[in-house]
Amino acid sequence: MSDREHEIYDVVGIGFGPSNLSLAIALEEYRDNGRANGGENGRAHDQENEISSLFFERQPTFGWHRNMLLPSATMQISFLKDLATFRNPTSSFSFVAFLHASGRLPQFVNNQDFFPTRQEFHQYLEWAQARVADRIAYGSDVTSIRLLPGAVPELSDRLRLEVADAAGRAGRVVEARNVVVSTGLVPSMPEGTERDERVWHSSEFLEKYRRMNPAELRRVAVVGAGQSAAEITRFLYDELPHAQVSAVIPSYGYSVADDTPFANQIFDPGAVDDYYFGTDQTREAFWRYHRNTNYSVVDDEVIRDLYRRSYDDEVRGVERLQFLNLTRVTGVKRAGVETRVSLQVGPDAEVRELEFDALVCATGYNGMEPTALLGDLDRHCLRDEAGRYRMERDYRIVTDPEMRCGIYLQGGTEHTHGLTSSLLSNIAVRSGEIADSIVARRARKADVR
């Protein structure tokens, strides 16, 4: 039995995207604050109060939507909604601190823009994760979470996690008093459509695109009505001057994202309380009035870029960019290198078949669903009438009263916490609330002892 089988942590994070990166930073700053406030007793504080943590990530290195780092694509949130600022404005992990460390702070200010490029924000995330890299195990896939062998919930305050390496070989076993699941969203494809070398989801776009010979892409289609679909359509039009690019849109053109000040208040930290403690009618109103702040909407600038390109084509008498409005994909067949796509068009539901060299499905994601990962533990997790996990305000799953371990979710809680449950907009505050909950629960257990 290896020494690793005796590893015990206060927190184990499963998945290491921005959400759990923000949590790692919150825990790091909790430790640093303890040292700063402890004076000569700082070392004693470390030993008695430090929250030990480890994060497992399936990917071999850090990456966040790498395949959508398109040239000139910008963030849709302010740079101040970074990993730490809304929780701790003086944090050394802020985007401003990153700019200072990179020597670009004056230039960024001179740019007079609240919205950095996606490429630069990814650089920021990589810079931040490098500073907590000693608590991250990349190329590691958590395959199961369960109670300790022979344990019953009321007598055990730890969970056992089994971890496989990148090759799928099991080997590492750790124990955790709290688990924070943040495995991300799951790509969604049109019904009956399977991914292959010519049919892509937006989450794999750049990787698949770069494998292709651009000269072979003469007819390409992009399915979807959201930001990713519009950005990919613009990218393909600009990168493939010889190709016809078809935008397959279920609505009558793109809808603009509402990012006006009052609408943006839906992403404020306080809005989580309004949603969580609100009535069913309140929650329904949130979605009815504010869904257009995030779902199937596109930034005004991107919409205007595409319309301008389409109009320029019309002036020149060419038809490189076409919009297939009120159209849905109903089936895909492969014939050699060609992809035959069945499309249901318009209110009369006319079905037509078109051939493309590549089909990109920017058709969104399904929510995070940890049921399979939790396995037998799931029976200790309580659900509501709709079969969804009941959640505490601190993002912890409501479990049987005797369950002493904490299982937290970063994602999959829109039904209880609203729009920001998996978004960057509230990431710093959300992770800080989870860290505070873990610290408080540990203190209560110590008092009981």
Image: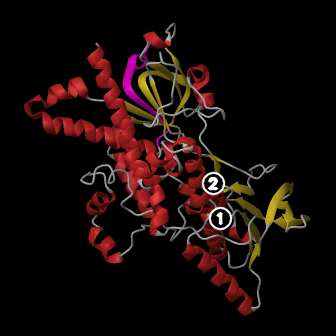
Q: Quadrant of residue 299?
A: bottom right
The one nearer the camera, 46 or 61, is 46
Q: Nearer the viewer, mark 1 or mark 2?
A: 1
* Residue 221 to residue 445: above or below: below
Q: Which residues are magenta?
A: 1-16
Please name the residue that numbered disc 2 is placed on: 204
Q: How is the image coloured?
A: secondary structure
Residue at x-position 62% and y-position 54%: 203
SS of the residue at dot 2?
Answer: helix
User: Dot 1, how many residues are within 10 Å of its Cα: few (below 14), some (14-19), or many (20+)?
Assistant: many
Most extreme residue toward the left is: 40
Amino acid type indicated by mark 2? Glu
* Residue 101 to residue 183: above or below: below
Q: Quadrant of residue 251?
A: bottom right
SS of the residue at dot 1?
Answer: helix
Amino acid type indicated by mark 1? Ala
Q: Is residue 75 visible?
A: no
The one nearer the camera, 298 or 229, is 298
Q: Position of residue 399 (x, y in %)?
A: 51, 24
Quadrant of the frame with the N terminus? top left
CA gap between label 1 and label 2 equals 13 Å
Please state the total of marks drawn on the protein image. 2
Q: Position of residue 90 (x, y in %)?
A: 24, 53
Q: Which mark is residue 229?
A: 1
Q: Position of residue 162 (x, y in %)?
A: 52, 23
